Amino acid sequence: MLVVFIKSLAVFFLVLIAVRFMGKRQLGEMQPFELVIMLVIAEVACIPMNDPYIPFYYGVIPIVTLAVTQVIVSFIARKSVIVRRLLSGRALIAIDADGINYENMKKMNLNVNDLIEAVRSAGYVDISQIKYAIIETNGKLCVVEKENDPMQPAQAYLPLPLIIDGKFSSDNVKLAGTTEPALTKAIRKNSLSVREVLYADIRQDGTLYVSPKKGKCFTGKLSITGGGNW
């Protein structure tokens, strides 16, 4: 038992030193290859701790090797754009002037719900107020707001999603006080079918925001009776 206790403490401080050696950025946002190395270090660190009969160096050597590898790879990535692109990928625009970029969403294997949650987490409840949203290589969301006239502050509304990836959110449609046929009719005014809509929401004043899978986003008006329900 004493051997396991001593080995556990030794491995803990060794991992702590390795993380500090790899750089402070490891403690914040990690790139994909950095995350992989941290996961592997966590796994190999458990090997000598769980079994008192396994030699201590069985855990030390892999940890040191991985830490040194990470430092070397990071140095090469700083010097080479190609290596950096291979290891970390590149930032992609999730929302642009035309609305949600469907093609980039597919490249990132990101669905609309994930994007909306990320936008809300960044402090933006209304996607129509966003000019650009960029998903960085570390998974963070960078948002550029649309220009607003400071002399005419806009009324704050909470958008209610009605269509996500070509499918109605029936509960929300009912909550908004409208119907699927009425919503379909409003969308068809712009020569679109519901299946071609990537995302659509409604505000308490009846403003409808639609971002199609292909083409430019647009807004319109829709008569609703449930504006005070959400």
Image (cartoon, rainbow, N blue to C red):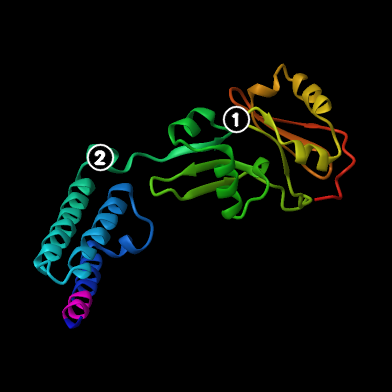
Q: Dominant secondary structure of the magenta stretch?
A: helix
Q: How far apart are marks 2 and 1 (CA)?
A: 29 Å
Q: Position of residue 36 (x, y in %)?
A: 28, 51
Seen in the image, is 187 located left or right of residue 52?
Answer: right
Seen in the image, is 93 located left or right of residue 194?
Answer: left
* Span of residues in magenta: 3-9
Name the residue type under label 2: Val
Residue positioned 31% across, 60% down in the render:
26
How would you rate the neighbour count of disc 2 (Cα within 10 Å): few for under 14, some for 14-19, many for 20 or more? few
Q: Position of residue 98 (x, y in %)?
A: 60, 30
Seen in the image, is 193 located left or right of residue 97?
Answer: right
Residue 217 sits in quarter: top right
- Cβ–Cβ below 8 Å for labels 2 and 1? no
As rendered, which of 65 and 49 lies closer to the eye? 49
Give the total of numbered labels: 2
Residue 226 numbered mark, or none? none
Reading the image, the residue beneath label 2 is: 81
Residue 186 sits in quarter: top right
Reading the image, the residue beneath label 1 is: 98
User: Considering only vertical position in the picture, is 199 above or below 215?
Assistant: below
Q: Is residue 6 magenta?
A: yes
Q: Check disc 2 and report its element: helix, strand or loop.
A: helix
How would you rate the neighbour count of disc 1 (Cα within 10 Å): few for under 14, some for 14-19, many for 20 or more? some
Q: Where is residue 188 in the image (x, y as percent from the top left)?
A: 76, 19
Q: Earlier in the sequence, mark 2 or mark 1?
A: 2
Name the residue type under label 1: Asp
